[in-house]
Image (tube, grey):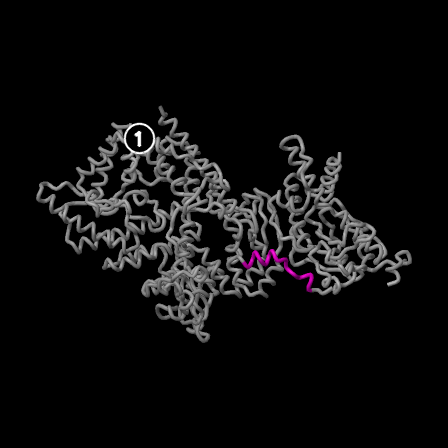
Amino acid sequence: MSAEQHLIAPEVVLDFLSAMMPFDELDEDTLHKVARHIRVDFFPKGTRLLTAGETELTHLFLIQQGGVKSFLTDDEGNVTLKDFRGEGAYIGALPIIRGTTANLDVETVEDTFCFLLPREVFLELIQEQPGFAQYYLKSFSEKIVNTAYTELRHHKMIRRGDEELYLFTIQVGDIIKQDLRKIASTATIQDAARAMAGYRIGSLFIHEEEDAENIIGIITDRDLRNKVVARGLDYKEPVSRIMTGLVAKILSQATCFDALLKMMSTGVHHLAIERKGRIIGVVTSHDIMLLQGTSPFSLFKEIGKQRRIQGLYPLSQKIPDIIRNLIKEGAKAGNIARMISLLNDQILERLLTLLEEELGPPPVDYCWLLLGSEGRREQTFKTDQDNAIIYADPPDAAREKIAAEYFSIFARKAIDHLVNCGYPLCPGEIMAVNPKWCQPVSVWKNYFASWIAAPEPEELLNATIFFDFRPGFGKVALADDLRDHLGALSARQEIYLLHLARECMAGRAPLSFFKNFIVAKNGEHRNKLDIKTQGLTPFVNFARVLALKYGIRETNTLSRLHVLSREGYLSEELWASAREAYEMQMQLRLIHQLSQIEEGVLPDNYIAPDQLSDLEKRMLKESFEVIERIQGVLKTIFPVG
Amino acid sequence: MLAGLFPGLRRKKHPALLRNKELFENFNQGGLLSDYTFVVCDTELTGLNRRRDEIISIGAVRIVNLQIELSQSFHCYIKPRNIDPNAATFVHRITPEQLLHAPPVEEVLPAFLDFCGSGLLVGHFVAIDMYFLNKASRRVLGGMVSNPSIDTMRLAKGYKEAQCIDHFGGCDQSASYNLDLLSEEFNLPRFKPHDALEDALQTAYLFLFLVKKLKHGGISTLKELYLAGRIFSLMGRG
């Protein structure tokens, strides 16, 4: 008997770990060592694994098989679903790294087998394997770490510029903004605050009275707020009363990433930078955030600052990175879509403002309309342009001609720039550059009147994307006027709603099965599910027809549904189910498209059900059942025959 | 060696066996399941002939606190006494070469008993494993193994019968209780049938699944688990 034989970790664990990020980066010896520490546990469906604020993590959970949901329960018992995780996902990394109790409630939604990796072993990996810290921290924080470094390496995606690597290459010593600011421990609180105000800094070091080189503490804005103002402490007290005595330090040659790691693991936002035994400055979490430049907000601001249209091209290319980070951080699809709209709108606003400067002011007021998914604020990654221009009716024929010429040039330039920004042309030519869709108010009103009165439903159905218009830029009042007109028309002409409702009910939810889903039988998308047409569109159509019927001005599908429920047209319960189902499908689509982009494939809507986890399949199936229910609602509102 | 050839001559029990016996002198069945150590084992045999055949490998994993400890596994080949020169006929995935260089059961068995410690033995159709373990133990250690044993096949029967009685008030008697089919039916993670260790691991997953599912149904002590397995297996025979 050799003792070795007792220590061979079964292959199954090795296989599992070596296929899982970031364990796949470990060398063979380390992998074996880690595998030997693993225990296997089984949790029947419905087992509570973690309770936020209570559970102390003794190990990291790695899901071998099964699935869990994470959620938060507030004081009033309301539950917010945060995430579903399935095979190959981990649970509990953040609280272990931070040394806190669980940050979320976690419960199994299937019979689940987990590999348990003891806390100490995991922390050792975090300390010793640089890839580990990067991997987990990256996936945690909303603002701090949104670098795509690990992804970039794993997916071999082309990097756009080097700014994303700053975190890993720049030393903290290099980002010191100004000289070290300090004050003697005997100085008053007011002196300290005055110094901070004078230097315009958020933190100040405290040195020993006799020895200015000996840093003994730090105060921050927060100390002034929490320990002084809030408690009514006398400003004349010595500053040493409110300082934090132990200053966390970091060597000046450490990378910014090390600094970030230290901040996250110790929970402090300020680190003293040490060089040759002396404190030479401070680095804050804010400094590091600024380094990244890919947070949604910083991109938003950067777009707004552009002075040249060409400057917008590279900025709009950053949007997918931002979306990717939001997805990885577990943001909900509805919020992601709204974020995309915000950023796209900002690009559009800047672009058209600069274009107006270039071409001179428009002869009459106009509004750039966004249609279809843009109009509904439901874009994912780069979707086709669907836009139009509506302008105020010119007073005479001469000025009508001038306006038509101006907007024709304006639209052509705008569309070209948008293409350069990465928004593909609309194959159906529903764009402002098409003279048909660049018209004065009176013509637009006639368009809608004719669609609504159309005896042929065909023409109406081709025009549905126009019903989701919203103002993108320019004179909002023009779009509002058109919306009012549409409302008045709808109230008189209900028959077209019946056509829309019929169309909505015609599509059957895919509940017959290939691996439980209806899929294309042949062609390029054989055995795939079209998540847009079969999944999302029925919700969009449903929300649109009811919004038109009840005069709801919202264009976003979830907002429409929400208003419908608030005004009592839709039961609270159905609204909740529909929201969950719709968001789930949007999420699946986003993730699908994200992985296509990372593989360098043009994103589409075709999902292969056999590549979904059991959990995803089940959720998708449940979401299709909701479609049947909303169709039932339509049937009662619009009885057929 | 003489004692090995003539078991009757052996008066003195092997120290490993004495230690083993001592561990179970005051065995308490009333404890919580999570307080016991379970040793899930699988043996591979030269055949099923009770008189002639013998164990050629043992694989085992330990379950502590109702969690499988992968750091604590046991896997060993055993050189059989009557090694067949045409041993390629072995149904197992073991080559004759591996067996020729393996230690004899006289060395492996005491090591295995030490590995088991005070753990309860768990196996799928454990009676077979126990028969051949005891046969070897009597011969080379001078007595029987004292560890109580639990049969996952009986537990599975108990679980399935309890389930279908709950739902339909009747029971499908034709169901198979083969380890592979059960693992498939319960949708357990699957292992390539590889060797005794992987089989033991598959059995350990089954055991964990059953125990925790039964625990949900209110079974929390060893005694209750024993009754669940036994009562249902009697019913199954009727």
Residue at the extreme right: B9
Quadrant, the N terminus of chain A: bottom right
Is A415 left or right of A191, judged from the image as shown? left
Report the residue that reaches farthest toward the bottom: A276
Q: Quadrant of residue A189?
A: bottom left
Q: Which residues are magenta?
A: A4-18
Q: Position of residue A228 (x, y in %)?
A: 40, 57
* Main secondary-structure element of the magenta-colored stretch: helix
Magenta stretch: includes residue A15:
yes
The residue labelled by disc 1 is A497
Which residue extends farthest front? B86
Residue B4 rendering spot, x and y as whole percentages: 86, 60
Nearest to the observer: residue A84 or residue B31 = A84
Residue A260: x and y in percent read 44, 62
From this view, report whether residue A89 is shown above or below residue A134. Answer: above
The answer to whether residue A185 is seen in the rendering is: no
Tell which of A145 and B1 is nearer to you: B1
In what element is the residue under mark 1? helix
Residue A121 horizontal side relative to residue B115, left or right: left
Q: How many marks?
A: 1
For residue B212, what is the image quadrant? top right
Which residue lies at the image location 69% right of the left edge and 61% below the top edge?
Answer: A6
> Which part of the image, by quadrant, shows the C terminus of chain A?
top left
Q: Work out whether residue A180 or residue A629 is closer to the camera in this orientation and state it.
A: A629
Q: Nearer the viewer, residue B76 or A279?
A: B76
Q: Residue at x 88, y 57 (%)?
A: B7
Q: Is residue A633 left or right of residue A315?
A: right
Q: Is residue A327 visible?
A: yes
Q: Is A17 one of the magenta-colored residues?
A: yes
Chain containing mark 1: A
Crowd band around label 1 with a 10 angstrom C-alpha radius: few (<14), some (14–19), many (20+): some
Which amino acid does the dot numbered 1 rest on? Answer: Leu
